[in-house]
Image: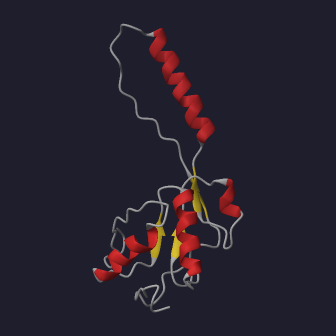
Amino acid sequence: EQHADARLHVLRFDEDGGFIPALQTLHTAGIGPTALFCAHDGLALTAVSELLARGYRIPDDMSVIGFGDFSAATQISPPLTTIRVQGGEMGATAMRLLLERIETRGQPVVAKRILIASTFIERRSSGLAPRHSKWLTPFER
């Protein structure tokens, strides 16, 4: 949002062999992504594995960022940049809200907004966007 030349494109794929065809669809549309922000670390690990198998250098050619900070995020090379969620705090907050709801049974429910901060864990799978945005197909590599 801070950079006029940055664009968001949704890339949906199945973890079993769907990543490269989905990325190829973007390429066919003339879109050369420089970063992938994945819904969870499992998808990010799939993306890293497929990109490395095709000769990509991460993060030189493309950054990959996950979500969840799974233990596998530190067991791959390069280690995965990710977002760590505060699962324990989320669970404790949910329990407090549930107990409050039980104690006030029959009374109107008061809407609440609760913010639990996540933490950006920067590792080596992310970096500056490459100067080029040309995405090579697996056949061109």
- Residue 65 visible in the shown view: no
- Residue 27 visible in the shown view: yes
Name the quadrant of the N terminus.
bottom left
Q: Residue at x 37, y 66 (%)?
A: 11
Residue 15, percent across and down? 49, 60
Residue 73, percent across and down? 65, 61
Q: Residue at x 68, y 68 (%)?
A: 76
Q: Quadrant of residue 12?
A: bottom left
Residue found at the very far top of the displayed protein: 106
Residue found at the very far left of the displayed protein: 29
70, above or below 29, in the image: above
94, above or below 62, in the image: above
Specify the color scheme: secondary structure
Frontmost residue, 80 versus 120: 80
32, above or below 80, in the image: below
Frontmost residue, 139 versus 90: 139
Residue 78, percent across and down? 66, 73
Count of numbered labels shown in the rendering: 0
Drawn side of residue 36 relative to residue 31, left or right: right
Residue 64, percent across and down? 53, 70
Residue found at the very far right of the displayed protein: 75
Q: Residue at x 48, y 67 (%)?
A: 17
35, above or below 110, in the image: below
Frontmost residue, 139 versus 101: 139
Drawn side of residue 18 relative to residue 118, left or right: left
Q: Residue at x 58, y 60 (%)?
A: 82
Frontmost residue, 101 versus 51: 51
Q: Quadrant of residue 136?
A: bottom left
